[in-house]
Image: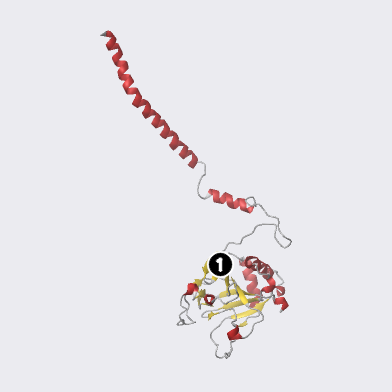
Amino acid sequence: MKGNKGRAPWSLRSKLSLPVVVAICILFFLAGFFGSELLSQSQDVSPIRPQSRLLEAEEEEIAFRILPHGDTGDPFVSSPPFQVLSWMPRALYFPNFATVEQCQSIIKIAKANLRPSTLALRKGETDETTKGIRTSSGTFVSASEDKTGVLEFIEKKIARVTMIPRSHGEPFNVLRYELGQRYNSHYDVFNPAEYGPQKSQRIASFLLYLSDVEEGGETMFPFENGLHMDGSYDYKECIGLKVKPRRGDGLLFYSVFPNGTIDQTSLHGSCAVIKGQKWVATKWIRDQDQDMQ
């Protein structure tokens, strides 16, 4: 009896020890797991930080392995940021393409020589019959006329993003749109059937917005993605894809396809300025070297 009584307490402890030990092990495991999670979160691990470090690395050119380049290439990596606005027509938006100071310099250069804007007339058209289509004021300025070097810098930057040599560009057409002024929908490309044979063709346009516009003044593409092309569109209407002018931003769009045919969706215009004033510098780019014309 004494032996049985002496073993009973030990047997009870044995039955209780197994679940207790298992529970303790589970508690230690959970404590370790959550402890490691808290520790990792306290060490500046966030979705934003790695991106920041990556951007810093890019600025220092650490993230890139630079390739050997040709004689006309660059020994550095560069990629001005851009956004694809549309594939029909092909339109790209370049934020902060120019600085405030550069925009102000271009306005200053053009201001003294502004004249009422004119149109390239189609067969049968006259100045009188086309009156009111384009009501802005403007002037042409080439980079060689600008002693500050700003236009040359912008021209080189446009050539870089388009991969089309500077010699294919026309002089800058600097335009001012005041209250109520607009440019009805039109094509920058010259259809030979309407304008006669062309020595060279405008294939792309780059618009550099030189000022903000409080209201109105958008560049619009009414045929974007093939819309409104049923023949009923009023060319004075401000509809479709609209790009709001913001100082220093750039807009690039192509008027022809790679095979040289006209992109009918590249029809575009300038909506009337409702409040404020719009300044823009346009660079028309052709398929032929203009220095050889």
User: Is 163 situated above or below 58?
Assistant: below
- Amino acid at dot 1: Tyr
Which quadrant is the C terminus positioned in?
Answer: bottom right
As drawn, is 25 to the left or to the right of 282?
Answer: left
Residue appearing at x 48%, y 38% in the figure: 39
User: Is 124 situated above or below 191?
Assistant: below
Which of the 4 image quadrants contains residue 203?
bottom right
Q: Is residue 119 visible?
A: no
Quick one: 126 or 168, which is closer to the camera?
A: 168
Residue 255 position within the rendered picture, expressed as x and y whole percent measured from the top left: 58, 75
Element under disc 1: strand
Quick one: 182 or 121, which is closer to the camera?
A: 121
Residue 59 position within the rendered picture, expressed as x and y whole percent measured from the top left: 63, 53
Quick one: 134 or 276, which is closer to the camera?
A: 134
Most extreme residue toward the right is: 71
Residue 18 position within the rendered picture, expressed as x and y whole percent measured from the top left: 35, 24
Mark 1, Cα crowd under 10 Å, few <14 / some 14-19 / many 20+, is: many
Residue appearing at x 52%, y 50% in the figure: 48
Which quadrant is the N terminus positioned in?
Answer: top left
As drawn, is 115 to the left or to the right of 180?
Answer: right
**Count of picture labels:** 1
Most extreme residue toward the top is: 2
Q: Say which residue label 1 marks.
A: 93
Q: Is residue 292 visible?
A: yes
